[in-house]
Image: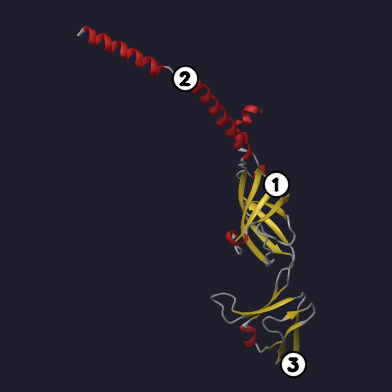
Amino acid sequence: MPEINESLEIRSTEMEEVVGTIPPWVIRWGITVLFVVSVVGLVIANVIRYPDTLHGTVLMQGENQPGKVTIRRTDENAGFQFNFLVKNGDEVSRGDTLLTRHDPKTGKDYYTITPMKGRIYITKGIDEKNTLDQVIWVVPRSSTAEVKVRYSSKGAGNVKTGQAVKIELNDFPVTEYGFLEGTISSILPMQVDGEHQAYVQLDNPKIVTSENKEIPVLPVMEGNAEIMLSDRSIFQRLFGSLLN
């Protein structure tokens, strides 16, 4: 029995030596792999950008806004007779007569003349409560638009001129048309209806999206905006304060 115990002890000692000894090449490769992974991680963290952004709403207004003439039912009851000289889809020029109004009481004729060039749209009814009045719309074409961005007070002090802005319009879904790009051109120094307001200069005057699609300039378009306050990398975010 003592011989068996001695043999077991010898074998146990040999196993401990084998298990407890790590080959030097494993240590060298392990350090190398860790170093390479660390370097790659730092490079990726320095390349990937993670900008600070501020979200807001957008209002785009065409340079030429529509005009309208309202013909109320009460006017007809008062003895006026109307003669439409235009119809839906007509193109009119400045100075063209849209309609005449004749007053049987006086025998006089009144003329409604358009001060602008545009396409005619005739609608009936002002809203769900008023379905009798008629409106003649003169909608001019616009090639440019004024772009206003509104945003809340939180973080508003970080908005500066020259910052990039991405715009998504409600009428033209970003998944299909892409987004518009521009820069902050000026900032209004006071609040409007409790919000800050800035003006945006689009990068492309033809209103071309990131998907290279040109969209028409409607009289009014609304959407959302993302202001790029800063364009820092992940590395700068993690170690910026230490490096400074």
Q: Amino acid at mark 3?
A: Gly
| Other residues around mark 2 within 10 Å, as few (<14) / some (14–19) / many (≥20) | few
Q: Residue at x 68, y 84 (%)?
A: 87
Circle on res. 19: none
**Mark closest to the chain's N terminus, 2 or 3:** 2
Whole-percent x and y of residue 233? 63, 38
Assign the C terminus to one quadrant of the image: top right
Between 103 and 42, the residue placed more toward the observer is 42
Disc 1 and disc 2: Cα gap in Å? Answer: 56 Å
> Disc 3 marks which residue?
107
> Disc 1 marks which residue?
163
Whole-percent x and y of residue 79? 66, 89
Disc 1 and disc 3: Cα gap in Å? Answer: 63 Å
- Dot 1 falls on a residue whose secondary structure is loop
Whole-percent x and y of residue 224? 61, 56
Between 190 and 164, the residue placed more toward the observer is 164
**Mark closest to the chain's N terminus, 1 or 3:** 3
| Other residues around mark 1 within 10 Å, as few (<14) / some (14–19) / many (≥20) | some
Q: Residue at x 73, y 79 (%)?
A: 91
Image height check: is 44 above or below 78?
above
Image height check: is 36 above or below 19?
below
Q: Quadrant of residue 63?
A: bottom right
Disc 2 and disc 3: Cα gap in Å? Answer: 114 Å
Foreground tag (1 vs 3): 1
Determine whether label 2 and label 3 are within 8 Å by CB.
no
Q: Amino acid at mark 1?
A: Gln
- Dot 2 falls on a residue whose secondary structure is loop
> Disc 2 marks which residue?
23
